[in-house]
Amino acid sequence: MMQNVHLAPETDEDDLYSGYNDYNPTYDTEELENDTAFQQAVRTSHGRRPPITAKIPSTAVTRPIATGYGSKTSLASSMGRPMTGAIQDGVSRPMTAVRAAGFTKAALRGSAFDPLGQSRGPAPPLEAKNEDSPEEKIRQLEKKVNELVEESCIANSCGDLKLALEKAKDAGRKERVLVRQREQITTPENINLDLTYSVLFNLASQYSANEMYAEALNTYQVIVKNKMFSNAGRLKVNMGNIYLKQRNYSKAIKFYRMALDQIPSVHKEMRIKIMQNIGVTFIRTGQYSDAINSFEHIMGMAPNLKAGFNLILSYFAIGDREKMKKAFQKLIAVPLEIDEDDKYISPSDDPHTNLVIEAIKNDNLRQMERDRKAMAEKYIMTAAKLIAPVIETSFAVGYDWCVEVVKASQYVELANDLEINKAITYLRQKDFNQAVETLKMFEKKDSRVKSAAATNLSFLYYLENEFAQASSYADLAVNSDRYNPSALTNKGNTIFANGDFEKAAEFYKEALRNDSSCTEALYNIGLTYKKLNRLDEALDCFLKLHAILRNSAQVLYQIANVYELMEDPNQAIEWLMQLISVVPTDSRALSKLGELYDSEGDKSQAFQYYCESYRYFPSNIEVIEWLGAYYIDTQFCEKAIQYFERASLIQPTQVKWQLMVASCFRRSGNYQKALDTYKDIHRKFPENVECLRFLVRLCTDIGLKEVQEYATKLKRLEKMKEIREQRIKSGRDGSGGSRGKREGSASSDSGQNCSASSKGERLSARLRALPGTNEPYESSSNKEIDASYVDPLGPQIERPKTAAKKRIDEDDFADEELGDDLLPE
């Protein structure tokens, strides 16, 4: 077998193109005259005859073919010329084209030279697409399903959950039609499983988003049980989340663990998240030991803030002090993985560098870093406030330990905030002196911390009505940080308390210039303008504040009150209606609505709102008085009795309410009950002339023998009253001269006293109108009934709002605060 194998010589591998420059005597034209064959061909037609091999180019039977394995004998032409690919002197030469480019037999028949085939004309048109073919219909239907899935996802991201669910259902229906058509045309192996998976997964997600948990679980089960879907087991995490929302914690843990078993260890991040879900579920069920095991594993593998915080909560639940300390240290040690602030400071004056830094200073990545840092600080502060009172013998020692740990970490700036929280804790324990001492320690700190502490001190002294101390600490806060809006607001409050409203408004304006979102300053400047009777400007401030705080009861009341002062009751009623939609159980807002409707002459609406106010707060004397007068006016004296009896319980020393009860009994015809009531009043108030007059009249009408006794007492009291009046009159006559000298000054002050005494005049007019005084049988006039209004959230509505740097207590100072308190900077 090996004898037919011929190896190429090694020399040929060195130079495949050797021999081209060797001289061949055949090409020597100088010897052509001596070449007999050549001369014969020239003289005869022998040279014009075609060669023997012209018709059949490949019929060279007698000539051996030179190949890489066969004989290397050179092939000579009829003229003795070596053929292409022949071997010269033992050296092979590469083969070249047999025919020239573009040469065909057609050229011999007179065809034009056309190597590019341009003579064939343009290409035929493309074959038209047949839209009625089954394959094309399937492609179009598949495209429509994909579009529906995308539209469903977009609708979900825009918050339109119902539309997202409808699109997902439509995609599911069309996908089933697509599967049936594919099964009819092709084999089942050609079904697009990825499309089916995406449609089912999107449908399950939309069911879950619309809180249709049963349908979502059924759809997930269809996906999970289908073995043709790869990695479908991880969707059991979603099923566990649904069971967690349904508070079916045992099944949630079961599905979390099943998903954890089916996820390979290379997906470390996903496994950590599932274990975190398991730990949270254990906390919900109260199995803190199992939760601790999960969170400990997470903190050992890939520590994060949420797991660290939950670990502290678990140790706090079981009361393990030492473990709480260790968990807090682990939480402090979690890396933030964010850039330092120095990165965003330009190191040079290069304009290109400055532009780049300016572009990335507030981009989305930078905002994400800020959010991550804020979240870390929130977790640490909350954990410190939680464990500080329990890890040591006292909360002060616990806070000191937390402060030392924080100072030694990357969150050193939080140490001062913890100290301020320590002061707030003293306040909650009613230890005012310790809180002040703790805050005074910050007077030697840097300007930012000093300003925060001084702001809190000013706030505390203001709540204690020590306005001098509040003003001094407000000055210290402003001097430490002129751009601190809370300090400027507190300074304005102290000036407001002293009555200098114009100057207070200047401080509020400066606070708003430094921070346009300072709602306390905006609210207080509205109060200031109202005090200055600049109602349009006050209304503008409160409307701006309403755009920021849509559901603030105080703001809504102030707007209604300003409209009332502007004598626009319709607008005042409209804003009060918004107020009771926010606080529907506020009795004072309801009574104010009743007062406005009463002033407009709508007694039925006024009665409705006064009744609602009485239902929520049955101790408002003004509401009780109006309702009693209303029933007397409508001739339902029996119903008025219960209101006046309640008023007599609230004010037992006021005889007028008991007289009203007796008068109602007499008007309703129950004279015996009226007589008993008057006798009881006479025993309690033996010197009351009105009661004796009623007793005399009733005994006379009934014919009782006691009439003479009561008449004698009445005459004696009237005589004593006359003597008393004569003494008062003589005293006035003696001092008439000095009073005449003061008439000028008194008249000048009458304008100021008018507003102060207006409410007293209304009250006296109301008492004169009610029965039971001089005319017991006359009905009262509701036009004189008046009900004052106090802030629905507290008795000090006109008091300016303070701006504390930390939340003290929502219950203690609800009427002083507006929205969330500012945190320390």
Image (tube, helix red, strand yellow):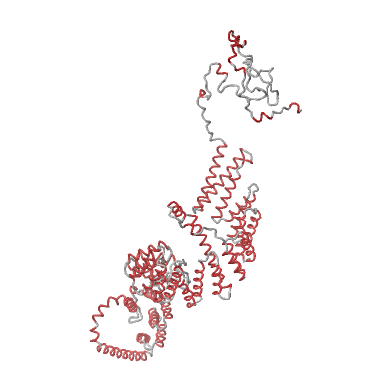
Q: Where is residue 727 drawn, in percent x and y?
A: 28, 90
Query: Is 683 displayed left or right of 33 in the figure?
Result: left
**Residue 45: in sight, yes or no?**
yes
Q: Is residue 747 above or below residue 5?
A: below
Q: Which of 91 and 111 lies nearest the eye of the viewer?
A: 91
Location of the N terminus (image quadrant): top right
State the image coordinates of residue 241 (x, y, percent, origin top left): 59, 57
Against 337, is 128 above or below? above
- Which picture quadrant has residue 658? bottom left
Where residue 261 sits: x, y (%)?
66, 55
154 left or right of 61 in image:
left
> In front here: 29 or 507?
29
Q: In the rendered picture of this protein, how many numbered marks are placed on residues?
A: 0
Q: Residue at x 65, y 48 (%)?
A: 227
Q: Position of residue 590 (x, y in %)?
A: 41, 69
Q: In which image quadrant can residue 731 be found?
A: bottom left
- Identify the residue at image location x=55%, y=56%: 211
Q: Residue at x 58, y 50 (%)?
A: 201
Answer yes or no: is residue 590 visible: no
With 741 as the anchor, is 790 left or right in this view?
Answer: right
